[in-house]
Image: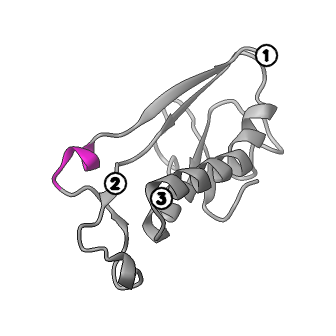
Amino acid sequence: MGGMTTRFFRFRPGVSRGLNKPAIGNPFLSPFEDQIISFGFPDTKIHTSKDGLTILAQELAQAFEREVLPLIRRLPERSLCLFFADHGFRENPQFEPHDKYAAARYTHGGNSPWEVLCPWTAYFKIK
């Protein structure tokens, strides 16, 4: 929990100064109210993976279970979470499986819907 690419931020409505600075503490030690948590593992994994999409998805699911689920389990009832990405990705056309270390397998989407479409979902914890 709280891996190297996880950052915790305090959000104070109406106060923009300091929003991009990591909060003092983390949600394991303080209330969850008004917090933004940035999980970097998806971006890191996508940019370093040489595996196909099936294995990549499995590894991201395992990282989600390790990094995110412990936080969700600790949320109080009636908590709302928004999960979103900052951009999409696509398979790199220059990637060659026989020479898999010459180029990245996945890259930013460039000038395409794969870059500008940002997946997101909402989760409302009932109990």
**Pointer 1 with pointer 3, Cβ within 8 A:** no
Q: Quadrant of residue 65?
A: top right
User: Chief secondary structure of the magenta span?
Assistant: helix
Relative to residue 93, is residue 28 drawn left or right?
Answer: right
Q: Nearer the viewer, mark 2 or mark 3?
A: 2
SS at badge 3: helix
Q: Which mark is residue 83?
A: none
Label 3 neighbourhood size at 10 Å, few (<14), some (14-19), many (20+)?
some
Q: Which residues are magenta?
A: 111-116
What kind of residue is marked 1? Lys
Residue 49 in percent (x, y) is at 48, 68
Determine which residue is flagged by label 3: 43
- Per the image, the residue denoted by label 1 is 127
- The residue pinned by badge 2 equals 89
Give me the C-alpha separation between circle 2 and circle 3: 9 Å
Whether residue 22 is visible, yes or no, is no
